[in-house]
Image: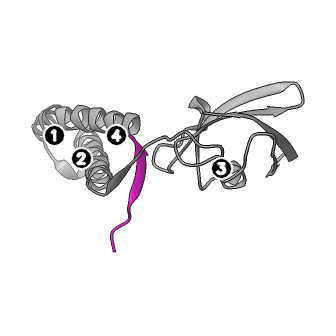
Amino acid sequence: MKKAYQITEEGKLELEKELEELKGRRGDIAEKIASARDFGDLSENAEYDAAREEQGLVETRIAEIEDILQNASIIHATKSSTVGLGSKVELKTGKKTVIYAVVGPVEADPLEGKISNESPIGTQLMGKKVGDSATISTPKGETTYEIVRIS
């Protein structure tokens, strides 16, 4: 059974852009391989090995992105009083306020404020309402967040 990926429209566009960039690198990598072959014995040719490794990484990522895009279902953010996929959630802990977008695991990037619905904080937030609190266990201990706003 194929895995279904849940992504936002923005995430789909980012993946499509990355896919085009990776496909554009194929020609450069082929040139590197051809050039490295000219150096002679392939068994001791570091340039050839590096170019082949780069080719493998690029082709693997291309296949991964194509699989995600073929099996993706688009998350449509809806106005809701509870946290769900596609929600933007403003959380407060003490004096600190953070805003996260709840997305599927494919798009998750905590440094950019995108958390997966499958992450520890994401699972604790799902289904909660404004005013509810969620306690998350982190390596630094437990942190309690209060939901200030959902959009």
Q: Earlier in the sequence, mark 2 or mark 4?
A: 4
Q: Amino acid at mark 2?
A: Arg
Q: Quadrant of the N terminus?
A: bottom left
Q: Amino acid at mark 1?
A: Ile
Q: Which residues are magenta?
A: 1-8
Q: Report the residue marked by disc 1.
A: 33
Q: Report the residue marked by disc 3.
A: 122
Q: Is residue 123 visible?
A: yes
Q: Position of residue 3 (x, y in %)?
A: 38, 65
Residue 19 numbered mark, or none: none
Q: Earlier in the sequence, mark 3 or mark 2?
A: 2
**12 up-or-down from 60: above or below:** above
Which circle, 1 or 3, is nearer the viewer? 3
Residue 12 numbered mark, or none: 4
Marks 2/1 in contact by CB < 8 Å: the verdict is yes
Q: Amino acid at mark 4?
A: Lys
Q: Report the residue marked by disc 2.
A: 52
Q: Is residue 92 left or right of residue 46?
A: right
Q: Amino acid at mark 3?
A: Gly
Q: Is residue 143 left or right of residue 147?
A: right
Q: Earlier in the sequence, mark 2 or mark 1?
A: 1
Q: Is residue 68 left or right of residue 124?
A: left
Marks 1/3 in contact by CB < 8 Å: the verdict is no
Q: Earlier in the sequence, mark 3 or mark 4?
A: 4
Label 4 environment density (alpha carbons within 10 Å; few <14, some 14–19, many ≥20): many
Q: Is residue 56 left or right of residue 150?
A: left
